[in-house]
Amino acid sequence: MSIYAIRNTMMAWNTNRPYTDKGQRIAAITLSDGRLFFFDIDRNVRGVTETATWGCREHNIEFVMTCYDHGIYESVHSLMWHFSDLTTLLGDLYKFARDYNN
């Protein structure tokens, strides 16, 4: 099964946790199977939620943070077999989170 990112679902936020002088910037995107792929650019943590969600932006952010904070996510390496453009996606998410202003 091929999994792909649904490009128009990209979101970014800053938790304002004091991990860096810029806070904690995170970007996420919905995958075709309903799971969320996220990238914490300040702590260099990447993951995929273990379950799917099809909520609104606010719900998805809360869902990602709950999964992230409680370790309920898979390593990004689980996607490598499915993604041909993983490096491009990581770059896009990095830029999106870096440029996000809350």
Image: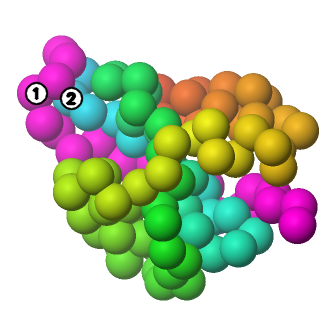
Farthest residue to the left: give it. 18
Can residue 22 be spotted in the picture?
A: yes
Q: What element carries label 2?
A: loop
Q: Please name the amino acid that badge 1 sits on.
A: Pro
Give the colouring mode of the picture: rainbow
Q: Quick check: 46 above or below 56? A: above
Q: Where is residue 79 in the image (x, y as percent from the top left)?
A: 70, 47
3D distance between C-alphas at marks 2 and 1: 5 Å
Say which mark, if any, is on residue 18: 1
The segment highlighted magenta reads 1-21
Crowd rating for badge 1 (residues with CA inside 10 Å; few <14, some 14–19, many 20+): few
Q: Where is residue 10 in the image (x, y as percent from the top left)?
A: 61, 55
Q: Please name the amino acid that badge 2 sits on.
A: Gly
User: CB of mark 2 within 8 Å of CB of mark 1?
Assistant: yes
Look at the magenta stretch and give its main secondary structure. Answer: loop
Q: Position of residue 72 (x, y in %)?
A: 33, 60
Q: Is residue 4 left or right of residue 90?
A: right
User: Residue at point 56% right, 29% down?
Assistant: 94
User: Residue at point 22% right, 45% down?
Assistant: 15
Pointer 2 or 1: first along the chain: 1
Q: Mark 2 points at which residue?
A: 23
